[in-house]
Image (tube, rainbow, N blue to C red):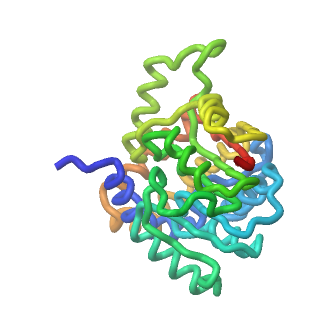
């Protein structure tokens, strides 16, 4: 029986999240290495710096109710709850991730202000206008319907609330830019297969969707240079004895993903894979 995309994503993260935490820590996202990607720093610090830089870029200084879409094991959710003295809700398709995030919130003494659920980001189980901040850090690439995803983010935002999204994109491919070549499309298809992605789109396409849905004060940016060194660091640490033992225990899909890390590094090097940022505000209806 063929697994649905949701089942593939769930199983991928159920299998790989324990290894990621053991070897690379709680932040399951890129690191930030300065605007030009030239700053040398410890990888976990780079991941924390990415969160801080995103908050500064979006000019977020406070938020009472935060939704972390694609929360992993709660790395960003708990960091934001603590930093902003906020309540954070995280959603993921992986029960393993949701359970581990809950354990980590208890250990950090943040359980009263943090909740983690297994939920579909395309049909969120929240009332309209529930959150001041919707945070999506490297989850948009997993969404089969990008418009429905942004529409749900808009729906659950309170008037005046902010969406911050950082996601994998491909390079702009609409005029005056040339269309994706067959070789570029093949490269992307390999990434999709390994990381359980339906497809990615360009940052200008995300911006057009956000405008159509009614987001205001939209701001976008491309941080590809700033985050690209992350893949060199991860590749360098993926084949230590500790990591290799964990890979064998995690199973075939995780091993395949580890062996394919170079696809992302090469994608950045050739300018095909991009790290796109989008900020939008929901104004009063």
Above/below status of 180 relative to 86: above
Residue 264 is situated, as x and y percent measured from the top left of the image, at 53, 40
Does 30 sit left or right of 5 as displayed? right
The image quadrant that residue 35 belongs to is: top right
Does 196 sit left or right of 26 as displayed? left
The image quadrant that residue 225 belongs to is: top right
Residue 65 is situated, as x and y percent measured from the top left of the image, at 68, 68
Above/below status of 40 relative to 78: above
User: Toward the viewer: 108 or 41?
Assistant: 108
Task: Answer whether residue 42 is visible to the viewer in this image.
Answer: no
User: Toward the viewer: 75 or 116?
Assistant: 116
Residue 22 is situated, as x and y percent measured from the top left of the image, at 50, 72
Above/below status of 35 relative to 92: above
Query: Which residue is depicted at the point 49% across and 64% down?
Result: 20
Query: Which residue is depicted at the point 66% across and 65% down?
Result: 66
**Outermost front residue:** 285
Above/below status of 100 relative to 241: below
Tally the numbered discs.
Answer: 0
Does 165 sit left or right of 97 as displayed? right
Task: Answer whether residue 188 is visible to the viewer in this image.
Answer: yes
Query: Which residue is depicted at the point 37% across and 59% down?
Result: 10
User: Toward the viewer: 173 or 252?
Assistant: 173
Query: Which residue is depicted at the point 56% across and 65% down?
Result: 24
């Amino acid at each position: 029986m063929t697994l649905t995309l949701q089942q593939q994503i769930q199983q991928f993260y159920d299998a790989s999240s324990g290894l990621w935490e053991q070897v690379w820590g709680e932040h399951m996202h890129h690191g930030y290495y300065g605007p030009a990607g030239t700053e040398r720093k410890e990888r976990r610090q780079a991941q924390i710096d990415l969160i801080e830089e995103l908050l500064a870029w979006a000019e977020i200084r406070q938020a009472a109710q935060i939704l972390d879409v694609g929360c992993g094991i709660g790395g960003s959710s708990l960091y934001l709850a603590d930093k902003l003295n906020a309540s954070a809700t995280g959603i993921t398709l992986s029960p393993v991730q949701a359970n581990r995030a809950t354990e980590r919130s208890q250990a950090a003494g943040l359980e009263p202000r943090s909740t983690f659920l297994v939920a579909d980001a395309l049909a969120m189980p929240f009332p309209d206008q529930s959150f001041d901040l919707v945070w999506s850090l490297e989850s948009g690439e997993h969404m089969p319907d990008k418009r429905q995803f942004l529409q749900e983010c808009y729906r659950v935002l309170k008037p005046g609330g902010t969406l911050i999204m950082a996601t994998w994109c491909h390079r702009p491919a609409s005029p005056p830019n040339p269309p994706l070549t067959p070789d570029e499309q093949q490269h992307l298809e390999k990434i999709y297969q390994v990381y359980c992605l339906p497809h990615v789109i360009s940052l200008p396409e995300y911006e057009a969707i956000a405008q159509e849905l009614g987001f205001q004060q939209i701001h976008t940016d491309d941080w590809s240079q700033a985050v690209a060194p992350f893949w060199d660091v991860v590749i360098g640490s993926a084949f230590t004895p500790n990591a290799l033992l964990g890979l064998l225990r995690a199973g075939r899909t995780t091993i395949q993903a580890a062996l394919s890390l170079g696809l992302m590094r090469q994608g950045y090097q050739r300018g095909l894979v991009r790290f796109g940022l989008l900020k939008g505000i929901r104004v009063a209806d």
